[in-house]
Each structure stands twice: as C-alpha cells, then as structure tokens.
Amino acid sequence: MTSNGTSASEHSLSPDPADHGFTVVEFVVASAILLGVVVSIMSVIFFASRATASAAVRDSATNLANQRMEQARNLPYDDVGVYYDNGAFGDPPGTILTPETVNEFQVDTRVWWERDPGTGRATYKNITVTVSWTQPRDGSLSISSAMYGKSSLTNTGDVSITVLDIETAEPIEGAAVIVSPSSGNSRSLFANPDGEAFFGFVPSGDMDVEVQYEDYIFDMAAVEGAQVAPDALTRLTVFGQRPSSAVIHVTGSGGGDIGGAQVTISNAAGDEFTDTTNASGLVRFDGLLIGEWIVEATAAGRSDVTDTFAISTSGETVEYEIVMPDPAALMVRVLTDGSNSAIQGAQVSVTGPQPQSTHAPGSPGTTNPNGEVSYEITRRGTYTVTVTAPGFVTATRTVLVDPGSTQTIEVTLSAPESGNLLVRVRDNRNRPIDRARVGVWSEDGTYSNMNLRCNDGEVLISDLLPGIYHARVIPSGQTGSATVIDGDTAILTLVVR
C-alpha cells in the first residue's frame, strides 16, 4: 500500500496518452507523401531514359547526315545535284536521291546554286542535308556546306524564270517551274518568295517551259520557242491568273436557240477549244486566259459565223451571244414567155455564191404544177439560177441573197427558133452519091435519126433546135459536125473515099 492509498497494480493499469497508434488521417498523409516521392523518382528515371534515347537518335541522325554529306563531296562535281523519288530532276540535276528513307529516318537533300551578285550567273553549289525522325519524339537536324569544283559541261547558259500574277504583278511563290532543254533532262523547281526559279548550266538552244500551280493557269506565249543563250543569263517572265470561263449562246436571227452547233474559240497564244451547244444553244468553256478570243460557230443549214469577245479580269465568267442568220427562202417560179403559163418539170439549178459554182442545198430541183421550186440559202452572196425545159431556150438569172430573207424570182422561158441542117454526101470526085444512108444526132441528145436517105446525094433536116449536130455515112463511117443556129441552114459535106 502506498502512502496515498493507491495500490501498485492499480497504477500500472492506467492508460498513457503517449502510447496511442496512427490515426487514419495520419496514415493517408504519410501514404501521399511516399507516393509523391516515388513518382518524382520515376519521372526522373523516365526523362533520363528519354533524354538518353533522344541523344542516341540525334547521334545517329548526325552520323547519317555527315555520311550523306561525305558521299556528296566524293561525287564528280557535275553529279552533285538531286533527282526526286518520282524520277524528276531538280536543279542542279544530279545523282542524289531525295527524299530518302533510311531505317527510321528521312533524309532530305537540297542543292542550289550560289550566284554572282553582279551578273546573276551561277558560280558554285550549296548543299544542305536534313535528317528528321518521329521517335521517341519529333526532331530534325541539318548540316550545310559549299561545294566547289570544275564543271565539264560546255555550251551552257543560265535561265531565270519569274512567275507573276497578271493582275497584281505579285510573285506566285511555290509555283512549279519545269524546263526541258533540247538536250539533257528536264528539271523542275518551286518558285522562291520572289517568284523566281533559277536554273544553272542549262544546255544552250531550244527550251520548253511549263508552269503549274493550284487554281492557276499560265500564259505561255512569252516563253514559246524560248532559247537558252550560251554563256549568258536568259531572263523570262510567265504570268498566271485564276482561270476564267465563257458561256457561248448560239441563236438564230429569228431568236431561236441552235442546238448541235459546233463552237470553236481560240486566242493569239494558240489555245483552242471546241465543243457543241446543248439543246438550249449553250456551250461552256473553262480554263481561259485574259485577252481577246475568236469564236467560230458552224451549224448544218446555216452560214458559218466568226466573231470576237474579250475576257478582262481573272476568274470572271463571260456570257456571249453569237447570232447565226436563219436560211434565206428563195422560190423560183418558171413561166412561158408571153402567156405566163406555169411550166411543170423544168429543171432549176441554183449555184454560188459567186465566184463559186457549188449547188445550193436541194439544187438542181424540178418545178411543181405551179411552176415553182424552193430552196434554203445559207450563205450571203450572188447566186446563179439556171432553168432548162424541153422545147424551151435555157434561161439564166442572177440574184443577191441575204440570209434570213424571203425572195421570189420569176424566170420566163421562150420557145426556140429552129434551124436546118443540109447533109451532102459526095465521092472523091465531088459527085453526089444517091441513096446514101446517113445518121444524124444532136450533141445534147435532143435529136437522133440514124436512117436518113439521100436524094441526089443530099438530105435536109428541118426545124432543129439550135446546137451542135453530128452526121455519119453508114456504113463507110465518114463523120462530120456542124452548128445549127436560129433561122439558118447549116451545110455539112461528107466525102466518101
């Protein structure tokens, strides 16, 4: 028993505040601190690992770039240039493929000319090798060098081609410029921010130029037949524009639409387009340059028409109407002289326009019971109308025809005055041969009698139409010709030997 009356066993069983365990809050806080430490340590390890991997990739890329640069330095000077993976050559052209994939790397090589600041001529070559990669993260590096050497190429010149917008005169950066000299390979470059594409050491002589750029078309007239001057800089300019369009409406002079007409447009640059109008008489042409265009329209049964229209601004659509005159209606009425009776079955020919002798559509035609026949004339001009009918003298008229007009002309035919033909048959002593048999026929086929008998060596054929007649003694075969005229007797003597 202690002095204060408390037993020892009782004292030892009393709780001590300093001896209690961790609470839940204390445990959560401790776990968070431990997790933060672990994450920090792992992040350091991860970034250290990535940095090591990135450094290794960069070292490999550097080695690859240096390797490609050394390979370029070991090439003959004229081979230091690029060709693309599509087979096209850059400028300078050479044997270096770009772009090139090597394992996980892409190698892009660019070679370009250093130019004399005074003359603009090519002097030496610059080369840049760029190696890029995507793992462990995107990256790239480049190394550059100047390349000096002596070229073995002779009889060459330099070419500078500038590509400008035709309306603003601003450079068209990025336009693809392709030159194809008469000898050697074609080369292609993209225009720089000044719109220039420079080609060095191009074989002198003829050169074709092509320019391409999205949503642009180019007027190549200025570089048509371009020549590369030897040992000099040739400067050329090509103008581009947004493509324009033209909608051509073909109508008749009476206002109707003409479908199926062939329409051709062309310009001074040599561009030419041909298409056919639809049922509404419309045809559309796209990809047109600014400037004047010639339009030609042809359609069956109509005169050809040529006109011009102009495109004044880039990207505009011009609507233009071209009128094709409607055919002229020409009716020919054939009558008898004096009585004015209609002559049915007369043959009417219409030819022209003079000086041509081409038959109009439907010519020759034959008159109906009213003595009439009609034609559609498609071309303006003077036409010749010729009318023939059995038993009448052929008549000819001229008429001026305007497309779209309606005309009627009357042609009167008169009965011809007749003539006679006297055929004499003689022997070689000029004595008449009685009862000789004679055949007579006209050259135009209107008369033929092959069984005429001479009386005292003569036979007279009366009332013959004027014209050329032939006679033959049968069967001996002596033949001759004579011309019969109105109101006269032609004499033809045949001598039998």
Image (cartoon, rainbow, N blue to C red):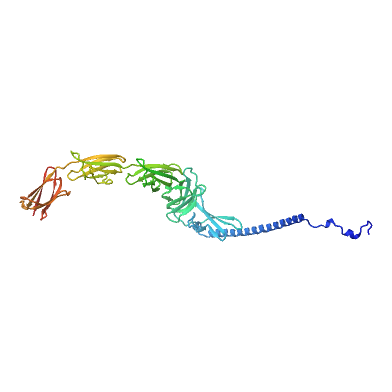
Residue at 84% x, 55% y is 17
* Residue farthest along the front direction in this orientation: 369
**Quick one: quadrant of the C terminus?**
bottom left
On screen, residue 419 versus residue 268, left or right, reads left
Quarter the N terminus occupies: bottom right
Horizontal and vertical percent for residue 271? 40, 48
Q: In this view of the protein, which residue sits in the foreground, 265 or 403?
A: 403
Residue 145 percent location from the top left of the image: 55, 55
* Picture quadrant where residue 369 is located: top left
Nearer to us in this view, 414 or 244:
414
Left or right of 435 in this view: 137: right
The reply to whether residue 203 is visible in this rendering is no
Location of residue 129 in the rendering, given as x and y in whole percent from the top left corner: 55, 56
Drawn side of residue 375 relative to residue 55, left or right: left
Residue 187: percent from the left, percent from the top?
A: 47, 54
Residue depicted at 82% across the width and 57% down the height: 20
- The residue furthest right is 3
Return the residue found at the far top: 338
Q: Nearer the viewer, residue 440 or 366?
A: 366
Q: Disc count in the image?
A: 0
Q: Examine the rendering and report whether any part of residue 101 can be seen.
A: yes
